[in-house]
Amino acid sequence: MPPLSLCARRFVLGLRTIANALSPRPLHLLSVALLLATAMPAGRAQAQPPEPEEPEPFIEPAESHDMTEVRAVVEAQPAKNGRWDTLHFRMPINPVHVALMRNGKVLVIAGSGNDPDNRRWQAAVWEPTGNTVRTFNLTWDMFCNGMVILPDGRPFVLGGTLKYDPFIGEPRTSAFDPATEKFSALPKMSGGRWYPTGTVLGDGSVLVDSGLNDANGKMNRTVQIWKRGAWTAAGTIFSGVPLYPRQHLLPNGKVFLSGASRDSRIYDPRAHTFTTIATTLFDRPRDYGTSVLLPLTPAQGWKPKVMILGGSGPMATDTTELIDLSVATPKWVAGPKMVKGRIHLNATLLPNGKVLVSGGSEKDEDGATAVEEAQLYDPESDSFAPASTMELPRLYHSTTLLLPDATVAALGGNPRRRRYQSEVEIYSPPYLFNADGSPAKRPTLGRITPAGALRYGAPLQVRTPDALHVSSLVLVRAGAVTHAFDMEQRLVGLSFTAEAGVLKAKAPANGNLAPPGYYLLFIVGDKGVPSMAKFVRLM
């Protein structure tokens, strides 16, 4: 699309400055801006040729989407729907991969940023409370990596891009220190991995599988586990494994693979075996759909349930499915339909146990069919409710991330090469507003003891003057998101008793329920309003 005129840009900036001055919340500005229609360039690179010996993994066509200016969206009922606000700064690199770190900052990785001609590989650290960002160069291309967060709080990057068109995977790995803001090289994997998935296991080790290799760009079917500073072989994955498989650690220590393929499997890290346990109702793979492990709560006996949403291609489905993995013979059942079909959507767990579902499009890589209506899924009622309207299309390579203030950041969108959505949006859920739209009063989160790491099964105390008015105490694992899937997010509720000024609880029983590492601790008041979070380390 043609760029805005200088006058129009100054007009938008002026509106944003005024709105920012009127905003009651320092992180956000009132949603007031302009939207110009875009024309989507037609050119796309071709996908990887099929493998003769096994089914071809789905590879998203290469992309290049023009940036879009924002439009005026004013939410009339924030206490009912929440509110989306667009920040008045732009992310300077393509935020393909994001991870919330233990200090509240966000690691953003672009690598080559979906530009095969770009040899300036970059990452950044974004500080959301002040909206400052520092970019820096990388020594190799971390574009299309897998990323988890190690128990010590360092984001762990698995693979990336060695070559474009056809894509060849990178075998290198690296860990990022939040304190020094520097990467350190770690041992290479058994081969390249482009589009791999990482999963932190109950003992703090890291499972990695899938991804295109560095020999001929075919599927890397080796399974590996990172433990005590080294990689060990952990089996061979099944033929036809998708890229970026959607995986969740279960409370029994096994790993559930929910997609994108129809057959759902359990991986046993001890036996190194995969077992098919169910088949989805949807009759096609849910390519670029998403998957969420729903909250593990004491009221439900910490029973694991998983929800899958949307996906397919080129047209997206509006269907969802749920599976209860605590029963002897799990099977998928139909969940509620979304407002529209979504592909490249994101789903984010909130402290109150609901799931924010946002972004995507009805047709793959088609901005004209962008789904800007967000929704809140309530696991208790098994239903969706409106969650206001995003100001910008969020398609391929978009991400969402829960922040310590209980809001959600939405970044990126890059359904065509060399261009990306640089604006950042913040979603403030309904729990942050009174009925008249003013900010809701939050419970106060005070001192947490023990002050150091929480030990599994050990007692803990949370000081708060609102103790007698707290409905839940939850740990939410800091997220690491890319390609419509969060490899880290997890919500674990804690049993507690309340006395004047203090909550008394126990840490999760073991690492299978809550893998070791850093979590956001929230208290949620009896009116559903969460506190600001504090990071705690579980080990």
Image (tube, rainbow, N blue to C red):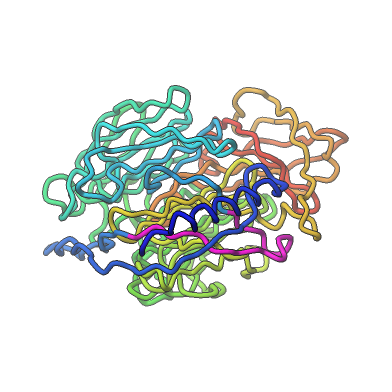
Q: Residue furthest front?
A: 7
Task: Report whether 423 appears left or right of 351.
Answer: left
Task: Report whether 106 appears left or right of 140.
Answer: right
Instruction: Give the quarter of the figure containing the C terminus.
Output: top right
Q: Residue at x 41, y 53 (%)?
A: 247
> Of residues 242 and 163, which is closer to you in this image?
163
Q: Is residue 43 above or below residue 18?
A: below
Q: Residue at x 50, y 64 (%)?
A: 35
> Of residues 309 and 202, which is closer to you in this image?
309
**Res 259 seen here:** yes
Image x and y of residue 281, in percent: 43, 75
- Magenta span contains residue 402: no
Instruction: Give the quarter of the figure containing the N terminus.
Output: bottom left
Task: Report whether 458 appears left or right of 368.
Answer: right
Q: Which residues are magenta?
A: 65-85
Q: Residue at x 55, y 55 (%)?
A: 11
> Of residues 98 and 447, which is closer to you in this image?
98
- Magenta span contains residue 83: yes
Image x and y of residue 509, in percent: 60, 38
Image x and y of residue 132, in percent: 51, 35
Image x and y of residue 14, in percent: 58, 51
